Image (cartoon, rainbow, N blue to C red):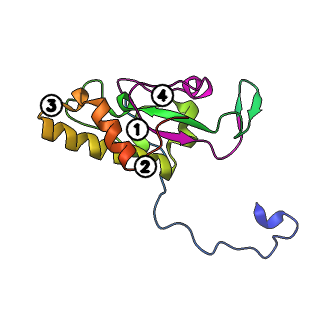
Amino acid sequence: KMKKKNGYENAYLMEVAPTTGVRVTRVLNSLHNVTLEDSMEWVEYPDVIGMSGVCDPFMYKGREITRQERPVWQIPYRSLVPRQTQNLLVAGRCFGYDQGITWDAREISTCMVTGQAAGVAASIAVNARCATKDVDISLLQKNLREACVRLNF
């Protein structure tokens, strides 16, 4: 079809990706799945472990939302904790969120934030000999702040 378009008469396929690039597959059913509405309402979580944000404008309720209107949103620790499986933390593109924030949640920076928090929380759980769902949030946040992780708007 492309060869029939003006200017593409001599175009040809040179290469295809050697592997499939999957952006989003499964997403955790966590203790709290972050929603687009949470992010749009600037919800502040007592168990915040980091921030994520939007890079590009997007549509919300029929209008374009710019970076200035919703530049960042908080990620709660509960969004890393599964509802059913014990002593597991889920970070990266699979933590708990809804489809509305997929484009923010799948970004590398968000993966780094959730990964760092999960690692620190796992260390705290091991040292305290407690379940991951029972990690001392104030200690987790203290450790994250000491590592210069942004927790607040």
- CA gap between label 4 and label 1 equals 15 Å
Nearer to us of marks 4 and 1 is: 4
Q: Which numbered disc flags the more N-terminal residue, 1 or 3?
A: 1
Kindly identify the amino acid type of the residue bearing the numbered disc 1: Arg
Q: Which residue is found at the position 52% from the left and 26% from the top?
A: 35
Q: Residues within 10 Å of mark 4 (few under 14, many from 20)?
A: many
The answer to whether mark 4 and mark 2 are in CB contact below 8 A is: no
State yes or no: residue 56 in magenta. Answer: yes
- Snapshot quadrant of residue 69: top right
Label 2: which secondary element: loop
Q: Earlier in the sequence, mark 4 or mark 1?
A: 1
Disc nearer the start of the sequence (4/2): 4
Label disc, if present, on residue 34 of the rendered structure: 4
Q: Which quadrant is home to the C terminus?
A: top right
Q: Amino acid at mark 2?
A: Cys
* Residue wearing tag 1: 26
Q: Residues within 10 Å of mark 3 (few under 14, many from 20)?
A: some
The amino acid type, in three-letter code, at marker 3 is: Cys
Q: Nearer the viewer, residue 145 or 13?
A: 145
In this rendered view, identify the residue nearer to me: 102 or 17: 102
Mark toward the start of the polypeptide (3 vs 2): 3
Please identify, in this view, whether the residue under mark 4 or under mark 3 is nearer the observer: 3
The range drawn in magenta is: 30-58
Q: Is residue 125 left or right of residue 98?
A: left
* The N terminus, quarter of image: bottom right
User: Where residue 130 is drawn, which disc sits there?
Assistant: 3
Q: Position of residue 137 (x, y in %)?
A: 30, 30
Comes first in the chain, label 1 or label 2: 1
Give the residue number, with chain letter if any, for mark 2. Answer: 148
The answer for how far apart the CA atoms under marks 3 and 2 are is 25 Å
